[in-house]
Image (tube, helix red, strand yellow):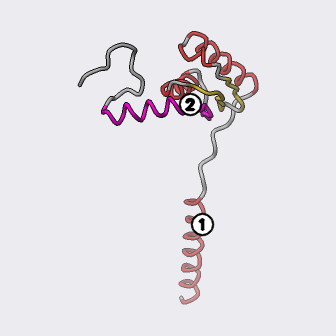
Amino acid sequence: MLQVLVTICVAAAAFAADAKTVAKAKPPAPQGASAQEDKAVEAAIRAKLEKSKIGKDGFTVRVQGGVAFWEGQTDVVQHKGAATRMAKAAGALQVVNNIKISDPAKAKAAENLAQGRRRAQVKRGDPRTQ
């Protein structure tokens, strides 16, 4: 009887240790896309880029393993976010956005936020009133 009880305790301890190992295991990373799929996603991103207002900023984009990599610099804060959304809409699994925002654009955005404006960029003309 004692031997059976010891066996059950050892089995329970082994099961608990195995359960902790399973709980710590990370889910598998998303599988990357093939080179052909990467080219298709990159072409879709470039097509969207040509049609958009951010196309004139001269950003570069490449896709590798389903991940879109953006490079460049902009004077409009919103263009960085637009690039990320564009890549995801074109089918990128993930986006690495290395687009830099110019210091004057950052300063203007901070000033607008301090004044309570919701938008970082304001159209030309008379300042908006609240």
- Front residue of 22 and 49: 49
- Residue positioned 56% across, 65% down in the render: 20
- Residue positioned 34% across, 29% down in the render: 118
Badge count: 2
- Front residue of 104 and 62: 104
- Front residue of 91 and 42: 42
Q: Is residue 93 magenta?
A: no
Q: Residue furthest bottom?
A: 2
Q: Mark 2 = which residue? A: 102
Q: Is residue 115 above or below residue 55?
A: below
Q: Residue furthest left?
A: 130
Choose the circle earlier in sequence order: 2 or 1: 1
SS at mark 1 in the image: helix
**Is label 2 or label 1 in front?**
2
Place of residue 92 in the rendered image (x, y in percent of width and height, measured from the top left): 61, 27
The magenta segment: 94-116
Q: Are marks 2 and 1 in contact (CB under 8 Å)?
A: no
Q: Which mark is residue 18?
A: 1
- Spatial distance from mark 2 to mark 1, Cα to Cα? 52 Å
Amino acid found under the numbered disc labelled 1: Asp
Q: Using a 10 Å C-alpha cutoff, classify the residue at mark 2 as few (fewer than 14 neighbours), some (14 to 19) or many (20 or more).
A: few
- Residue positioned 58% across, 14% down in the render: 48
Amino acid found under the numbered disc labelled 2: Ser
Place of residue 39 in the rendered image (x, y in percent of width and height, measured from the top left): 72, 20
Quadrant in which the C terminus appears: top left
Q: Quadrant of residue 51?
A: top right
